[in-house]
Image (cartoon, grey):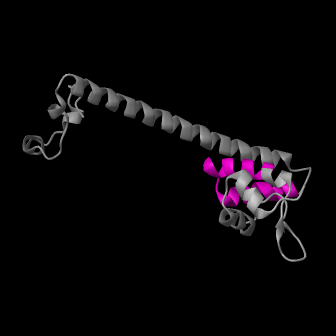
C-alpha cells in the first residue's frame, strides 16, 4: 500500500520536515520513491525502518553511524559481522548511558529525601544557600557537611 508523506508523518509521529531531512541525510533503508509528478511515495517497510531509525537516534546513535549501518544493510549478505559489531558498540554506549542515568537518579532521590526531611521537620532554612554570608565566609558548603544539608 502506497503512503503519502503526510500519512507517514501521522503514523510515525515525525514531522514532514523531519521526513524530508531523513531522506536528504540518506537515512531511509530504501531510497524514497517518487511518482512522475515528484510526490514522495512510502511503503509499510519504510514505517518499520523509521521506527527503528528514530530509536537509534533517540539513543544517541550519530547520523553517520546510522548511514554506515544502512549502507552495510544495502550491500546485502556478507557483512553481517560488521553490522553486528556496529550494533554491539552502540548497545555498549546505551548501557553506559543507562548506568549514568541510574547514578543521576540516585543522586536526585537522595537530594529529594533531604529536602523532604528538612521540610517535614520545619528546617528548610537550614538547607544550603550560597547567599548565606556565614557559609561564604567559612568557605564551606553545607551540602558537603556530614549533616547532609543541600
Prevailing secondary structure of the magenta residues: helix
User: Residue at 80% across / 48% down in the picture?
Assistant: 48
Is 77 in the magenta? no
Is 63 in the magenta? yes
Depth check: 50 or 1 in front? 1
User: Residue at 67% across / 59% down in the picture?
Assistant: 63
Q: Give the image location of residue 57, x and y in percent.
A: 65, 52
Give the left or right position of residue 107, taking residue 15 as reference.
Answer: left
Viewer can see residue 43: yes
Give the left or right position of residue 71, taking residue 109 as reference.
Answer: right
Depth check: 138 or 9 in front? 9
Q: Give the image location of residue 8, x and y in percent.
A: 76, 57
**Where is residue 30, by image quadrant?**
bottom right
User: Residue at 17% across / 25% down in the picture?
Assistant: 122
Viewer can see residue 27: no
Q: Which residues are magenta?
A: 48-74
Which quarter shows the C terminus? top left
Depth check: 15 or 140 in front? 15
Q: Give the image location of residue 94, x and y in percent.
A: 61, 41
Above or below, comparing residue 18 to residue 98 in the picture: below
User: Residue at 19% across / 37% down in the picture?
Assistant: 128
Which quarter shows the N terminus? bottom right
Q: Give the image location of residue 25, x and y in percent.
A: 71, 66
Depth check: 5 or 52 in front? 5
Amino acid at each position: 500500500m502506497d503512503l503519502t508523506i503526510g500519512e507517514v508523518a501521522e503514523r510515525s509521529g515525525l514531522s514532514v520536515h523531519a521526513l524530508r531531512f531523513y531522506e536528504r541525510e540518506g537515512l531511509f533503508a530504501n531510497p524514497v520513491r517518487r511518482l512522475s509528478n515528484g510526490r514522495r511515495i512510502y511503503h509499510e517497510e519504510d514505517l518499520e525502518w523509521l521506527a527503528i531509525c528514530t530509536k537509534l537516534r533517540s539513543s544517541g546513535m550519530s547520523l553517520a553511524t546510522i548511514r554506515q549501518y544502512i549502507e552495510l544493510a544495502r550491500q546485502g549478505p556478507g557483512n553481517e559481522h560488521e553490522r553486528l559489531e556496529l550494533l554491539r558498540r552502540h548497545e555498549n554506549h546505551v548501557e553506559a548511558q543507562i548506568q549514568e542515568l541510574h547514578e543521576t537518579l540516585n543522586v536526585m532521590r537522595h537530594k529529594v529525601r533531604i529536602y523532604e526531611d528538612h521540610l517535614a521537620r520545619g528546617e528548610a532554612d537550614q538547607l544550603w544557600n550560597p547567599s548565606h554570608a556565614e557559609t561564604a565566609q567559612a568557605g564551606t558548603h553545607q551540602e558537603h557537611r556530614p549533616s547532609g544539608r543541600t
